[in-house]
Image (cartoon, rainbow, N blue to C red):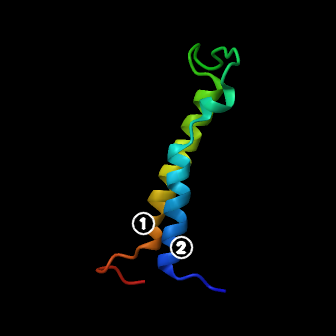
């Protein structure tokens, strides 16, 4: 079964939305967390940054790779 471009876009946007909404601190609720990097970045903060980055990269991928611009030829 082959997916159409529209179906691929929907899948990627749903994944990006999920990644943008995930709150990593829920997983660490109630745990004592100490800063790890630069004296202020903790493991949950690093995870959150990476999750947001993954969501942003998915959106960027769709915008620049999945949707061809009308004035560009392949």
Local secondary structure at mark 1:
helix
Measuring 61% from the left and 34% from the top, which residue is drawn there?
24
Local secondary structure at mark 2:
helix
Query: What residue sits right under mark 2 in the picture?
Result: 8
- Give x and y (percent) for residue 4: 53, 83
Measuring 51% from the left and 57% from the top, which residue is drawn there?
58
Please, is residue 62 above or below residue 16 in the view? below
The outermost residue toward the bottom is 1
- Give x and y (percent) for residue 71: 29, 80
Measuring 62% from the left and 22% from the top, which residue is drawn there?
42
Q: Within the image, what quadrant is residue 15 found in?
A: bottom right
Position of residue 60 in the picture relative to residue 26 (left or right): left
Measuring 41% from the left and 73% from the top, which residue is drawn there?
67
Please, is residue 54 above or below residue 69 in the view? above
Residue 35's tag is none
Query: What residue sits right under mark 1 in the picture?
Result: 64
Position of residue 13 in the picture relative to residue 33 (left or right): left
């Amino acid at each position: 079964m082959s997916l159409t471009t529209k179906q691929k876009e929907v899948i990627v946007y749903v994944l990006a939305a999920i990644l943008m909404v995930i709150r990593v601190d829920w997983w660490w609720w109630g745990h004592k967390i100490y800063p790890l990097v630069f004296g202020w970045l903790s493991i949950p903060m690093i995870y959150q940054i990476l999750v947001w980055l993954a969501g942003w990269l998915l959106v960027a991928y769709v915008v620049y790779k999945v949707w061809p611009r009308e004035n560009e030829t392949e």
